[in-house]
Image (tube, rainbow, N blue to C red):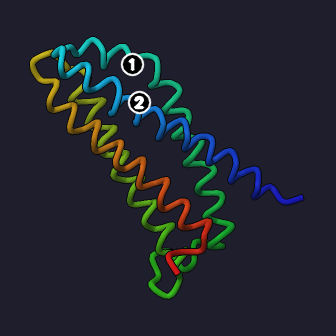
């Protein structure tokens, strides 16, 4: 039996946690926090979600690289216009790099200095991470569907 279907399922479950958590944060917690001008609401969510979310992201990275290796042995065809799957896997890697950059920025700059007064800056960051998470799901679906064609 091939391990590939298990990889897809585990990857999808981890993506559900990552993307779903950010949607809850962006569409549920963030609007309340902004109305109340309360950084405490964001901190409370982050304390609960961060360990789970980062674990889910790590699982996605491991399973994603493993699946990419199956799709593109030796990563041949990565970013190749002649290979739609290679292009999409490349896009996912770029989304991962953008996610990592935002995560590092949040962890080192925004979260340590978070206050009720500067909550708006974090709001834009949350929206960016959420948009990237949604893009991950869309591109992942396109990979499973064989591209846009």
> From what the image shows, is residue 34 above or below residue 139?
above
Left or right, 138 with respect to 118, comes to right
36 or 110: nearer the eye? 36
Question: What label sits on residue 24 in the rendered view?
Answer: 2
Write down the quadrant of residue 143 in the picture: bottom right
**First in sequence: mark 2 vs mark 1:** 2
Q: Secondary structure at mark 2?
A: helix
Residue appearing at x 28%, y 45% in the figure = 128
> From what the image shows, is residue 65 above or below residue 149?
above
Write down the quadrant of residue 103 in the picture: top left
> From what the image shows, is residue 57 above or below residue 98?
above
Left or right, 6 with respect to 72, comes to right
Residue 6 x %, y %: 76, 50
Question: What label sits on residue 45 in the rendered view?
Answer: 1
Residue 58 x %, y %: 54, 40
Is there CB contact under 8 Å for labels 2 and 1? yes
Residue 107 x %, y %: 30, 29
Judge the density around disc 2: few (<14), some (14-19), many (≥20) Cα neighbours within 10 Å. few
Q: Nearer the viewer, mark 2 or mark 1?
A: 2
Residue appearing at x 46%, y 54% in the figure = 136
Q: Quadrant of the N terminus?
A: bottom right
Residue appearing at x 44%, y 25% in the figure = 50
Write down the quadrant of residue 24 in the picture: top left
Q: Secondary structure at mark 1?
A: helix
| Residue 25 visible from this viewpoint | yes
Judge the density around disc 1: few (<14), some (14-19), many (≥20) Cα neighbours within 10 Å. some
């Amino acid at each position: 039996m091939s391990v590939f279907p298990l990889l897809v399922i585990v990857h999808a479950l981890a993506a559900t946690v990552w993307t779903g958590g950010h949607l809850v944060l962006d569409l549920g917690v963030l609007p309340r926090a902004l109305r109340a001008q309360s950084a405490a609401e964001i901190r409370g969510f982050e304390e609960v979600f961060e360990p789970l979310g980062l674990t889910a992201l790590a699982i996605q990275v491991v399973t994603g690289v493993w699946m990419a290796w199956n799709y593109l042995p030796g990563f041949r065809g990565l970013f190749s216009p002649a290979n739609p799957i290679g292009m999409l896997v490349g896009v996912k890697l770029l989304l991962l790099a953008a996610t990592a950059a935002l995560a590092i920025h949040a962890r080192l700059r925004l979260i340590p200095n978070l206050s009720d007064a500067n909550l708006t800056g974090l709001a834009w960051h949350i929206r960016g991470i959420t948009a990237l998470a949604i893009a991950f799901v869309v591109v992942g679906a396109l990979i499973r569907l064989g591209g846009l064609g």
